[in-house]
Image (spheres, rainbow, N blue to C red):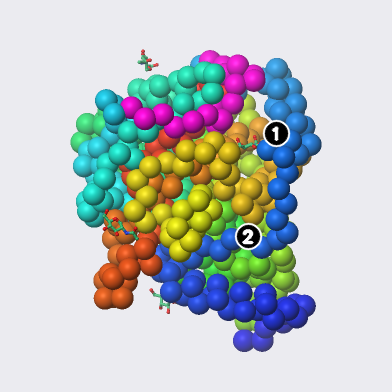
Amino acid sequence: MNLTVRETRLPPLVFTLLAFISFVAILYSYDFPWAFTPFHHQQRFPALNDPPPSLVELKHKKSEKRKETTLPFAVGKTPKDFDIFSGRWVWNEEKQSTYEESECPYILPQLTCQEHGRPDKDYLFWHWQPHGCNLPKFNATLMLEALQGKRMLFVGDSLSRGQFISMVCLLHGMVPENGKSMKSSYDSLSVFKLKDYNATIEFYWAPLLLESNGDGVGNDNVTERIIRKSMDKHGKFWEGADVVVFGTYIWWMTSLKLKILKGSFTDEVQEFEILQTEDAYRMGIQSMLEWAERNMDPKKTRVFFTGMSPSHTRSIQWGGEPDGNCYNETTPIKDPEYSWALNSHESIMNIIDEEFSRTRVPISFLNITQLSSYRKDMHTQIYKQQWSPPTPEQLANPKSYADCVHWCLPGLQDTWNELLFAKIFYP
Ligand SMILES: *[C@@H]1O[C@H](CO)[C@@H](O)[C@H](O)[C@H]1NC(C)=O
Ligand SMILES: *[C@@H]1O[C@H](CO)[C@@H](O)[C@H](O)[C@H]1NC(C)=O
Ligand SMILES: *[C@@H]1O[C@H](CO)[C@@H](O)[C@H](O)[C@H]1NC(C)=O
Ligand SMILES: *[C@@H]1O[C@H](CO)[C@@H](O)[C@H](O)[C@H]1NC(C)=O
Ligand SMILES: *[C@@H]1O[C@H](CO)[C@@H](O)[C@H](O)[C@H]1NC(C)=O
């Protein structure tokens, strides 16, 4: 193959860093890319109560839209100045926040922490409490009735898949055994069917949303990401969905630059353009918004975007041991000022803000980054299916193979869906 690559020479430090990243990526990105690397850019720490101007703009635009139209699915309204994503985690030992792991047969073995020996259960007793107002209670009946004759679709990577499974788990208890089925068809589509409601809840695997070499089955271990600025291939499967929940983030973060394929993946001679990760990510978000604008009817359908899911790979960030990670963590971070996003992920947050404030698509942003960043205790750690048995060295040091990217189910992603529920019915 004749690769034409235009690339500036990398300084040696960056090169070493990249080599290290690739090494870690090969070590860990078996099915999931949890070889997480902090985003590389100049760290800037703005005052916490000093939002970038684009946010003010966004809020302004949103309230304008709200006046013009009632959104589909809405049954009520959230007061304009009430932010359900801003709040704190409250412990209630009387009441588990969600269903039992054993009650939901659809959870993948990557996420069944209790089954894989997680010794503590405290993480299930923390409830999200927004400041100054209460969240509407998740009402499965209302959700099922609203989905009558409709398709709800989650699109993204393994974190989106977790959110999809969580939604299925939150609803399936209301439906008799013969009224539901789960199957994976095509290459990338999982469909949960609710027969009596003529409804489906679906997940489509497209970890970068755009066409990429991570698409399909068995390609989720690629270490060098190659993307193509096209959603035609994937978009075919999304057309006709009534509620779409997009999410994409971590797959962009395994290198500082990405290869953009100019032709198609089947071309004999492939030509690439190299983009900085931020620019490539912006391109992805823009393409998603363009797709939604062309294919979603704002009078009948709703589009959501789940924000960055934080990881907890370095406990020093929350004042822990210098060499620790999320392993053995059993309580949330208490410091309300703790911000994973400010710890170097801010530029991606800003891209999301900027692009969403510019678009005419009425997209709802599930701003789960900050509330999730407190939950260092919610990751699957070592309590999950291992792709290969841990080596004696790993067993001697369990934190070396802990997954600090994905979340136990039941768990945090049920809260994401409670927030999604609030945004669908009480926008
Ligand atoms: C849940 O929604 C259904 C259908 O809209 C409604 O009849 C019921 O009263 C709701 N339950 C609660 C607890 O709000
Ligand atoms: C089921 O829903 C689809 C839309 O998803 C609709 O086209 C079809 O007519 C519905 N079928 C019945 C029997 O209601
Ligand atoms: C990815 O997995 C496939 C099959 O599971 C294997 O053939 C391929 O060599 C793997 N690639 C890498 C980079 O590990
Ligand atoms: C994790 O917790 C176990 C049991 O409490 C303890 O024996 C072990 O030393 C802890 N490991 C780390 C790395 O903190
Ligand atoms: C998302 O939440 C964070 C923290 O609460 C906040 O700083 C940011 O402005 C929010 N972003 C948007 C677009 O609302």
Q: From the viewer's perspective, tell me whether residue 393 is left or right of residue 187.
A: left
Q: In which quarter of the image is the C terminus?
A: top right
Q: Does the magenta portion include 87?
A: yes
Residue 288 visible in image: no
Residue 67 coordinates in the image, percent (x, y): 70, 17
Using the image, tell me which numbered label, if any, was put on residue 49.
1
Residue 398 coordinates in the image, percent (x, y): 32, 65
Q: Which amino acid does label 1 sit on?
A: Asn
SS for dot 2: loop
* Residue drawn at the location 27% of the way across and 41% of the way down: 121
Q: What residue type is labelled 2?
A: Phe
Q: Nearer the viewer, residue 418 or 260?
A: 418
Q: What stretch is highlighted in magenta?
A: 76-92
Q: Which of marks 2 and 1 is in front?
A: 1
Using the image, tell me which numbered label, if any, was put on residue 39.
2
The image shows residue 420, relative to residue 15, as above or below, that is above
The image shows residue 14, relative to residue 415, as above or below, that is below
SS for dot 1: loop
* Residue drawn at the location 66% of the way across and 32% of the way down: 362
User: Which quarter of the picture shows residue 163?
Assistant: top left
Using the image, tell me which numbered label, if any, was put on residue 258.
none
